Image (spheres, helix red, strand yellow):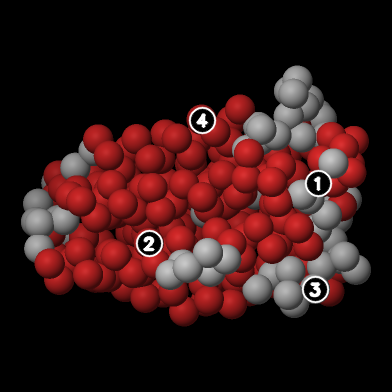
Amino acid sequence: MTEKLTPAQLESALRDIGARHYHNLHPFHKMLHSGACTREQVQAWALNRYYYQASIPRKDAVLLARLPDAASRRAWRQRLVDHDGEREGDGGIARWLRLAEGVGLDAAYVESTAGILPATRFAVDAYVTFVRERSLLEAVASSLTEMFSPTIIAERVTGMLANYDFVSKDTLVYFNARLHQAPRDADFALDYVKTHARTREEQNLVLAALRFKCDVLWAQVDALYSAYVVPGMVPHGVFLAPQADVALAS
């Protein structure tokens, strides 16, 4: 198709990508939310996801520098505050470390990223590179997975609290703020792409950017499933439960 989509049609097409490709559909997340994961598998998820969380403000700082007007920069700047916080111990990254500690990991071990899977590092770094090197329109569009995050957050918080005795509300406090931050950020990005994608070619780039971001998220949980579920092929030198025990003991 070559006809330009209306803004409503573009939004519908974006939401359809989420409905088909967002990582809440992955078998690993179904295990995680239903209580089918072992404690070590939950730890592996928290550890690897930290690298993504810690890289988000780097990605946002790159994008912020590319925005040409003050109003857009002010709106995007809030994302940095949300993740980095205003002070030490504040913000989303600090709250994710609380989650990691809550499931039994040592914070310094998590922050070192020494135990993450190679595929995690590759996928997340590819996302940061995408935002730096592709067009501003594509960079903004790649953030639109936030349109779908309230669904996975609701599933995750309810399921993990119900099914894991080592998880508490305090462990999952990271997700409280995201329930209002993610929709706010998604609204801005959605309005931006609907306004600035002025041709069908640009709209196709927007759709491809969101699909790419869904692939980035999917690849991370795919790697977790392959390493820690089936077939259980854990690369040398990455997280194993005994390694975590050593880190805790030290």
Label 4 or label 3, whichever comes before in sequence order? 4
Q: Is residue 122 above or below residue 35?
A: above
Can you identify the residue that label 2 sits on? 80
Disc 1 is placed on an element classified as helix
Q: Is residue 77 left or right of residue 44?
A: left
Q: Nearer the viewer, residue 69 or 187?
A: 69
**Mark toward the viewer: 4 or 2:** 2
Amino acid type, callout 4: Phe
Q: Position of residue 171 (x, y in %)?
A: 74, 69
Residue 163 visible in the shown view:
yes
Q: Nearer the viewer, residue 2 or 112?
A: 112
Can you identify the residue that label 3 sits on? 168
Amino acid type, callout 3: Ser
C-alpha separation, residue under disc 4 versus residue under disc 1: 20 Å
Label 2 or label 1, whichever comes before in sequence order? 1
Determine crowd level at label 3: few under 14, some 14-19, many 20+ residues with C-alpha closer than 10 A: some
Amino acid type, callout 1: Gln
Determine crowd level at label 1: few under 14, some 14-19, many 20+ residues with C-alpha closer than 10 A: many
Determine the residue positioned at 77% across, 35% down: 239
Residue at the extreme top: 236
> Looking at the image, do the residues carrying marks 4 and 3 touch, with CB atoms under 8 Å apart?
no
Amino acid type, callout 2: Leu
Quadrant position of the C terminus in the picture: top right
